[in-house]
Amino acid sequence: MQTRREMLSRSAGVAAMLAGLGLLPAVAQAEYAAAAFEAKTMAELTKALGISTPVESKDVTITGPDIAENGAVVPLGCSTALPGVKRMLILVEKNPSMLCAAFDVTDAVEANFNTRVKMGQSSNVMAVAVMNDGKVLFAQKEVKVTLGGCGG
């Protein structure tokens, strides 16, 4: 019978072998946009991501409630049917960290994402589409929060 100590020892050996072959994710992948998630303004965010200033577009859509009863779980969605989308972002203007979600997109993926975010107060939310050609497009919607999710 195999002991727990032997099992852990073998598991560590297998993990080391996989890491040596490059089959485990690198730690740096989780931090690719750490500065972007710390940005508090649109100017800081565009600088951190290395993108141009967004331009409003009818081709990008943001979905969410007009009034969110609980700011701790606000359902938001972003989408676009435009070809050549590289990344979709969901931003909340008055949150401590403006960037709430980032989705990398390829041609094999439909640029349509839904998630839940925390909102501390009523604010404008934005869906931003970063295109392969360098254009940055956005749509905006106001969401009113009756009970804040960030300690309010």
Image (tube, rainbow, N blue to C red):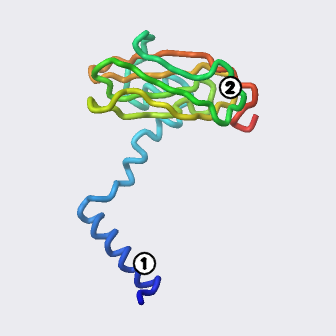
Q: Which amino acid does label 2 sit on?
A: Ala
Marks 1/2 in contact by CB < 8 Å: the verdict is no
Q: Residues within 10 Å of mark 1 (few under 14, many from 20)?
A: few
Quarter of the rendering containing residue 64: top right
Q: In this view, does 150 lie above or below 89?
A: below
Image x and y of residue 25, in percent: 34, 54
Image x and y of residue 35, in percent: 47, 37
Circle on res. 8: 1
Residue at numbered disc 2: 68
Q: Is residue 100 above or below residue 31?
A: above
Q: What element carries label 2?
A: strand
Q: Is mark 1 on a helix, strand or loop?
A: helix
Viewport quadrant of the N terminus: bottom left
What residue sits 32% from the left and 72% below the top? 14
Horizontal side, residue 69 vs residue 75: left or right: right
Image depth: mark 1 or mark 2 in front: 2
Circle on res. 50: none
Q: Residues within 10 Å of mark 2 (few under 14, many from 20)?
A: many
Nearer the observer, 145 or 69: 69
Viewport quadrant of the C terminus: top right
Horizontal side, residue 95 vs residue 23: left or right: right
Quarter of the rendering containing residue 17: bottom left
Counting residues from the N terminus, which is met first, the one under dot 1 or under dot 2? Answer: 1
What residue sits 68% from the left and 32% below the top? 71
Image x and y of residue 151, in percent: 74, 38
Image x and y of residue 45, in percent: 47, 28
What residue sits 47% from the left and 24% below the top? 78
What residue sits 36% from the left and 34% below the top? 104
Q: What residue type is labelled 1?
A: Leu
Question: Which residue ends up furthest to the left in the rendered image?
Answer: 21
